[in-house]
Image (spheres, rainbow, N blue to C red):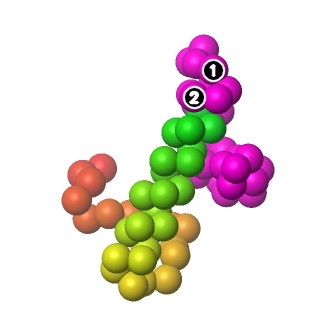
Amino acid sequence: MCSFNACKYNKSCRELYQRIVSKGKSKKLALIAVCNKLLKQAFAIAKSGLIYDETYRSTLIKN
């Protein structure tokens, strides 16, 4: 699965994985969550036609 490599090299995926595992969830569940995150990112990039930007923040999210 690509989620193994994403947990190694992608900062946001690594943080998601560690956050889920630290809550006591199984590692398999965390990998599936990372996989879903990657699918959502890939679909959004394909749909928008924009180049991947690691620092991108959605305007829909209020911080």
Give residue 29's mark.
Answer: 2
Secondary structure at badge 2 equals helix
Residue 5 in the image: state x and y as whole percent.
75, 53
The residue at 52%/76% (across/down) is 52
Residue 3 shows in the view:
yes
The residue at 53%/56% (across/down) is 38
What residue is shown with label 1? 26
In front here: 17 or 60? 17
For badge 2, the amino acid type reads Leu
Residue 13 in the image: state x and y as whole percent.
60, 48
Neighbour class for label 1 at 10 Å: few (<14), some, many (≥20)?
A: few
Q: Are the two marked residues, 2 and 1, in contact with CB atoms closer than 8 angstroms?
A: yes
Give residue 40's mark.
Answer: none
Neighbour class for label 2 at 10 Å: few (<14), some, many (≥20)?
A: few
Q: Which region of the structure is painted magenta?
A: 1-29
Spatial separation of the CA atoms under disc 2 and disc 1: 5 Å
